[in-house]
Structures are given as C-alpha cells and as structure tokens.
Image: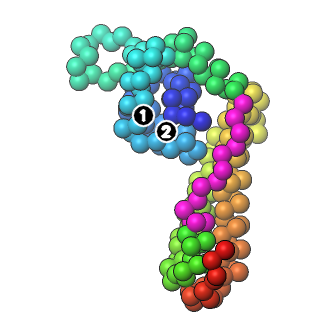
C-alpha cells in the first residue's frame, strides 16, 4: 500500500482538508498505514498536481483558508487500478526481532524490559481495537460489503495484536532467566 492510495481512499470516503485527513489517519488508517502530517500534506500537493484530486472552491479568499479536497475521476481510476493490481506480501521487518537476534550474539541486559514494554503496547492496541469493534462493528452493522471489508481490516489488526501478545508472553516465559551473556559462538 502507498500513501497516495491511502489518501485517495480517505478522500473518497469523505472530502476533507489536510488537517482533517491527518486527524482521520491518526484515528483509523494510521493503525495500518502510518504517516506523518508532513508526508500527508506533501502527498496532497503531488496528487493535486497529478490531477487526481482538487481543492473544492470556497467563497472566501484562499490565503490562510483551509483547503478541502475531493477526488477527481482520474484519482478514482488510479485507485481502482491499484486495488486490482496483485501484490506479494512484504517480508516482516522488526527491530525487536533483530535486537533479539543480536542479543543472541552479544548478550544484553535490557531485553526483558523491552519485551515487557512491547507486550504492554500490543495489549493496549488490542484493547483499543476490540473497543472499536464493539462500538463500530456490531453484527447488525456488517450487512453491506463495504462494512464487512472495513470490519475485516480491523479483524486483521485484532488478530495481529493477539499474535504479538501471545508470542511476547511465550517469549518472556521461555526467557525467564534472560540477562546472562551467551556463550561466544563461532562465525558461520
């Protein structure tokens, strides 16, 4: 997924200003495709130059006025083409897993605390996702395909957080005595 496609999706759901988009990213799309506010504003300019979006006309002068954007037919066509393009899964990149691999070589004393911290973060995210599911996706509100697709995206997040909570809990249990330096290993 790319930021331009995330922005086109959000604008097709609801025309918005850059500020509104950044807030919506913080509350929804940002859960699975994070972006800084600067990146969003920069991408809005590129999408406008490409003819994919336009700023809606306002009755007031533009200087200092918030621009609200909408998607043009070319933007919808771009998003549709992107949705229909196959894409292979991306390999997992995790600094935590890499840190653990490095600790296997050089040792480390703060890894247990880092695993516990990550466990807490993933548990809080899981709790937040479950609260969103209860609030926004009760069974009776999943009757349309768009609602079912939105719910499936959320379920993906829920399942991923459950995986991390379970895996981190297992890792902490297995590494109960973590902190000792490992025996030196021979280079492979």
Residue 167 belongs to the span the image colors magenta: no
Which mark's residue is nearer the viewer, 1 or 2?
1
Identify residue for label 2.
Answer: 25
Asked which secondary structure carries label 2, the reply is helix
- Asked if residue 3 is positioned above or below residue 52 in the image, the reply reads below
Q: Is the magenta stretch mostly helix, strand or loop?
A: loop
What residue is rendered at 55% in x and 69% in y? 99
| Residue 58 appears anywhere in the view | yes
Residue 66 placement (x, y as % from top left):
32, 24
Q: What is the distance, in whole Å, between disc 1 and disc 2 at their CAs?
A: 9 Å
Report if the CB atoms under discs 1 and 2 are less than 8 Å apart. Answer: yes
What residue is rendered at 58% in x and 78% in y? 105
What residue is rendered at 58% in x and 59% in y? 94
Residue 89 belongs to the span the image colors magenta: yes
Residue sitting nearer the eye, 164 or 150: 164
- Residue 17 location, quadrant: top left
Magenta region, residue range: 86-98
Asked which secondary structure carries label 1, the reply is helix
| Residue 130 appears anywhere in the view | no
Q: Which mark is residue 40?
A: 1
Residue sitting nearer the eye, 85 or 41: 85
Residue 185 placement (x, y as % from top left):
63, 83
């Amino acid at each position: 997924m790319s930021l331009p496609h995330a922005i086109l999706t959000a604008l097709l759901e609801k025309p918005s200003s850059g500020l509104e988009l950044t807030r919506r990213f913080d509350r929804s799309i940002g859960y699975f495709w994070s972006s800084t506010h600067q990146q969003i504003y920069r991408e809005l300019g590129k999408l406008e130059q490409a003819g994919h979006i336009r700023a809606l006309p306002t009755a007031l002068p533009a200087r200092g006025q918030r621009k609200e954007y909408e998607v043009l037919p070319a933007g919808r066509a771009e998003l549709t083409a992107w949705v229909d393009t196959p894409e292979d899964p991306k390999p997992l990149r995790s600094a935590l897993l890499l840190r653990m691999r490095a600790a296997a070589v050089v040792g480390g004393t703060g890894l247990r605390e880092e695993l516990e911290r990550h466990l807490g973060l993933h548990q809080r995210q899981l709790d937040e996702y479950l609260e969103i599911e209860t609030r926004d996706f009760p069974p009776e509100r999943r009757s349309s395909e768009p609602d079912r697709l939105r719910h499936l995206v959320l379920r993906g997040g829920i399942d991923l957080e459950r995986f991390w909570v379970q895996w981190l809990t297992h890792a902490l249990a297995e590494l109960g005595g973590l902190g000792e330096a490992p025996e030196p290993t021979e280079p492979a």
